[in-house]
Image (cartoon, rainbow, N blue to C red):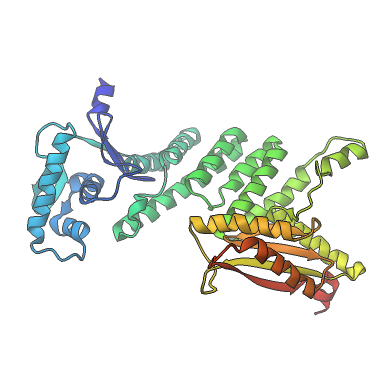
Amino acid sequence: MEKKMDEEMLQVRMLGGFSVTYKGIQIAGGPKARESQFAYLMQMLLYHGRKGVSRRELEEVLFGEREVGNVHHSLRSVLYNARKRLQKAGLPDMEYICQEKGQLYWTEKIPAETDVKKFKELCQLAEEAKEPGERLTYLLDACYCYSGDFLPQQSGVIWIAQEARCCRKMFFSCVEEAAEFLRMQEDWQRMKELGVYASRISPFADWETITMEALVSMGWMSEARKLYDETVEDYVREQGFRPSRKLMELLEQLGDCMDHQYAVLDAIQSELTEEERVDSGYLCPWPVFQGIYQMERRILERSGQSVYLMLCTIVDSKGNPMEEGNVLEELSKRLETAVCSSVRHGDAVTRYGKGQYLVLLVNTTREDCSVVQKRINSRFLVGRQRTGIKYYVSSVVCQTNRQKR
């Protein structure tokens, strides 16, 4: 009986996307659906519920600043077409959209269950819960109910943007409090699962710290280090900046927690050695590149050799850095190949941002840097290609000289 009632309700998703289903049939929205006046109408009515929406608000959302001869007539036309569409989708024949005192609202005869309403109710239940165990249950339910930003395809609409900020803030609060409860209980497995979910739903919000803390606490050091490397690469590749200090500090804690088994030196050395010799440059993630750079600065104190840091940036035909798009990703891969094959196998290379690579050229001269640049260009530029590479080169100063300055 309960299942039948659920089937006869409208199931409305507004978090992480928009869709409306009735008896298992999708009648609005979906991942490939384009936003339409019907979708806007359903979003407004189903979100506001019995409270309703005024004609003026609906007209503003549906028609905006477009020049419409008779706005009221146009709204009636949208409502008429919506009724026909809902009938065709299999809903019982009735007045779906009611009007009362200038307000329009969805009929109560066909109840609608919205994920955003359920999410807020779970947050409220967590707030009112007296027992810690009960509060944690509601917090976790709320976290997993939140499946993304509120109506993300409409983030430019003021009321939607405001609601999205509110829901995101509530989600962040739930995750932080739930993680604290799990930390106190030393329930590392559920804490790890929460961190993984939060990172997927809200990327680049440092939720990886929760996952890493749980992994370290369980003693899963290799998984924690792998997660760290992947996270830093993702931040640099997608956002162009490094993770927060909080996440970076966790790596230092990893070093303190790491406990290697006793092994003879040759066994340890075999683990450190590359499986086969590679003649191209050493392509490495940002944390490794950072360590190599810092080590080379120390070596400069006694070696006296010259080291140069070179930044290669893909630019368009006007010389401006390219910022996004599938073309940039393809060009970045080509630049990576060109750079690695143009430097010595003792030089370190890392991807720094979108369309950018850093190269550490060891024991070389400024003139040699120019030779490397020409070599990269010859491997990167094809035919009448309009894009190019802009280079920035800086001499690496040893740590002692930097301190004297």
Q: Is residue 172 above or below residue 88?
A: below
Q: How many marks?
A: 0
Asked which quadrant contains residue 246, the reply is bottom right
Residue at point 42% right, 49% down? 170
Query: Who is closer to the viewer here, 368 or 358?
Result: 368
Asked which quadrant contains residue 390, the reply is bottom right
Residue at point 60% right, 39% down? 184
Query: Who is closer to the viewer here, 300 or 3?
Result: 300
Residue at point 13% right, 31% down? 92
- Residue 298, position as x, y percentages in the image: 85, 65
- Residue 47, position as x, y percentages in the image: 26, 47
Query: Who is closer to the viewer here, 310 or 68?
Result: 310
In this rendering, would 359 be left or right of 318? right
| Residue 193 visible to an observer of this rendering | yes
Asked which quadrant contains residue 307, the reply is bottom right
Q: Is residue 248 above or below residue 381?
A: above
In this rendering, would 239 be left or right of 302? left
Q: Residue furthest front?
A: 383
In which quadrant of the rendered image does the N terminus lie? top left
- Residue 361, position as x, y percentages in the image: 78, 65
Q: Residue furthest top?
A: 1
In which quadrant of the rendered image does the C terminus lie? bottom right
In this rendering, would 113 be left or right of 331? left
- Residue 122, position as x, y percentages in the image: 38, 39
Q: Residue furthest bottom?
A: 405
Q: Is residue 298 above or below residue 223?
A: below
Residue at point 16% right, 38% down? 86
| Residue 244 visible to an observer of this rendering | no
Q: Is residue 394 above or below residue 196?
A: below
